[in-house]
Image: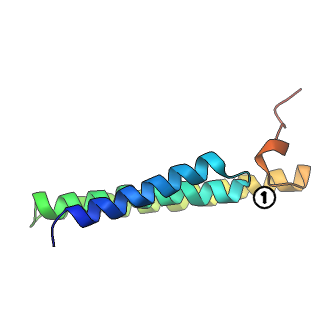
C-alpha cells in the first residue's frame, strides 16, 4: 500500500472537519469537527513517518502526544460548554454573546 490512500483519507477528514467548523451552529458539533481535523493530522503524521522513516517511531510518539492534547482540549471545551449552558440555557453559537457588556 502506498502513501496516497492515507493522504486521501486524511484530506477527506480535513475537508469534513473544516466544513463542520464553518457550518455548524451547535458548539458541540464544532468541537467534534475540530477533533476530526486533529485526527486528519494524526493520520498524516503516522503515514509520513512510516513511509519516510520506517524504523523510527517518532511519528507515532508525536501522534500519541497530539491525542493526549486533544483529549485535554475536549475536556476543557466541554466544561466550558457546560458552564455556558448553565448561564444562557443554549449551546448555539449565535446565542453566545456573554462578552457583551
Residue under circle 1?
A: 82
Q: Is residue 76 left or right of residue 57?
A: right
Residue name at image x 50 percent, y 57 percent: 16
In depth, the one of 4 and 86 nearer the eye is 4
Q: Residue at x 28, y 57 (%)?
A: 45
Q: Position of residue 3 (x, y in %)?
A: 19, 63
Q: In this rendering, does residue 91 appear at all? A: yes
Q: Quadrant of the N terminus?
A: bottom left
Which residue lies at the image location 81% right of the left edge and 50% below the top edge? 84
Q: Residue at x 84, y 37 (%)?
A: 98
Residue 52 x/y as whole percent = 11, 57
Which residue occupies the foreground of this view, 24 or 46? Answer: 24
Farthest residue toward the top? 101
Looking at the rendering, which quadrant does residue 9 occupy?
bottom left
Secondary structure found at label 1? helix
Q: Quadrant of residue 57?
A: bottom left
Q: Point out residue 54 in the picture as x, y percentages from the top left corner.
A: 10, 65
**Does 48 sit left or right of 74 as displayed?**
left
> For the residue carrying disc 1, how many other residues have a C-alpha within 10 Å: few (<14), some (14-19), or many (20+)?
some
Q: How is the image coloured?
A: rainbow
**Of the pair 82 and 18, the residue shown nearer to us:** 18
Taking the image as shown, residue 68 lies to the left or right of residue 74, namely: left
Number of callouts: 1
Amino acid at each position: 500500500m502506498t502513501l496516497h490512500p492515507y493522504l486521501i483519507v486524511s484530506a477527506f477528514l480535513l475537508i469534513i472537519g473544516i466544513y463542520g467548523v464553518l457550518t455548524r451552529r451547535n458548539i458541540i458539533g464544532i468541537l467534534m469537527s475540530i477533533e476530526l481535523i486533529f485526527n486528519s493530522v494524526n493520520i498524516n503524521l503516522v503515514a509520513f513517518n512510516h513511509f519516510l522513516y520506517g524504523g523510527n517511531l517518532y511519528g507515532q510518539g508525536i501522534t500519541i502526544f497530539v491525542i493526549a492534547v486533544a483529549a485535554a482540549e475536549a475536556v476543557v471545551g466541554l466544561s466550558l460548554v457546560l458552564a455556558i449552558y448553565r448561564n444562557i440555557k443554549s449551546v448555539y453559537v449565535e446565542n453566545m454573546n456573554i462578552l457583551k457588556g
